[in-house]
Image: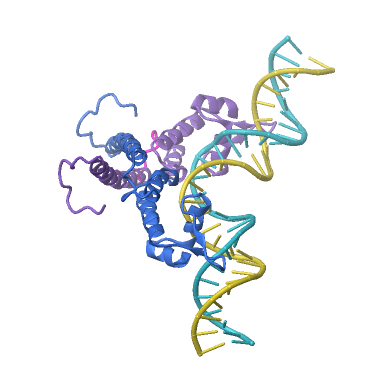
Chain colours: A blue, B purple, C yellow, D cyan
Amino acid sequence: MRIGELAARAGTTTRTLRYYESRGLLPARRSGNGYRSYDEDDLKLLRQIRTLQDFGFDLEETRPFVECLRAGHPEGDSCPASLAVYRRKLDELDALIGELRAVRAKIGLRLALAEGEPPLCELGGQEL
Amino acid sequence: MRIGELAARAGTTTRTLRYYESRGLLPARRSGNGYRSYDEDDLKLLRQIRTLQDFGFDLEETRPFVECLRAGHPEGDSCPASLAVYRRKLDELDALIGELRAVRAKIGLRLALAEGEPPLCELGGQEL
DNA sequence: GTAATCCTTGACGCCGACGTCAGGGCAACA
DNA sequence: TGTTGCCCTGACGTCGGCGTCAAGGATTAC
């Protein structure tokens, strides 16, 4: 299959595929005329990348998953390196969610104060 | 006060102040030699901007607060336009936190599955 | 006087994940 | 044979919030 078809089947663009190739993430074979040539396995790799991207992984973080699949494992997360990325991501998410919740609380408090209504509860000695 | 002192007192850089000025957010008077000149009110404006930036507001979102202060109100959030930004930001934060929690759950589930341990509970018909 | 430290403007660099255009080649169909 | 539709490479643009030079002028300290 050529690049346009792969892109369509994965719901992405040819530009994106060329970009992944430039990053060494999804190299392509070439047919006689120089066109990139892909197979079903490439589609699987690509879908793995896209799924992780949707989760907020950056490209480099998807690499262990891609390499895991390319090594013949049934799933991209069948390898220790992938699981390590999962764990790191969970930690990052927990930290981020915690920060966002703290910010949310502060803004909510400020809004309540500015609206002239006393906040429902004192939230401890927060810096405002 | 000149730009360097203001930057130091606000814990930021001269580059940042010139950038804010270029965005029309914190215009400066000029002294005879062409140097930017600031006063205590400018410091207050700047601190308002920085606080909101720390909350994750982008520059444009801080503008209503700055204009509110400049209009003579005691606080940047003493104006309806500022409160509207607060509310919009709360909505955005809620949405974002919700998405992150969903992603966190999916990754956690995948990690559990990949580790060979059955997940503690079925989390409904999530797409994996 | 001169060195050090401020200040000025202008302009390019950075980051990530591509979008978008330019200028060309290859292929298939009428 | 022309037209359409794919493909190629290369390269610049995007976004936000600045960092980091470069080349010069002003001020202050000694």
What residue is rendered at 27% in x and 41% in y?
B111
Q: Residue A41, percent across and down?
A: 38, 58
B76 magenta-colored: yes
The quadrant in which the C terminus of chain A is found is top left
Magenta-colored segment: predominant secondary structure: loop
Q: Residue A54, percent across and down?
A: 36, 51
Q: Decide which of B91, B24 is in the foreground and name it.
A: B91
User: In the picture provided, is A50 more to the left or to the right than B39?
Assistant: left
Specify the segment rendered in magenta: B74-80
Q: Tell me if residue B22 comes above or below residue B54 in the rendering.
A: below
Q: Tell me if residue A77 comes above or below residue A110 in the rendering.
A: below
Which picture quadrant has residue C24? Answer: bottom right
Q: Tell me if residue A116 comes above or below residue C20 in the rendering.
A: above
Q: Decide which of D7, B89 is in the foreground and name it.
A: D7
* Res B1 visible: no
Q: Decide which of B128, C6 is in the foreground and name it.
A: B128
Q: Residue B42, percent across and down?
A: 51, 32
A125 magenta-colored: no
* Number of numbered discs on residues: 0
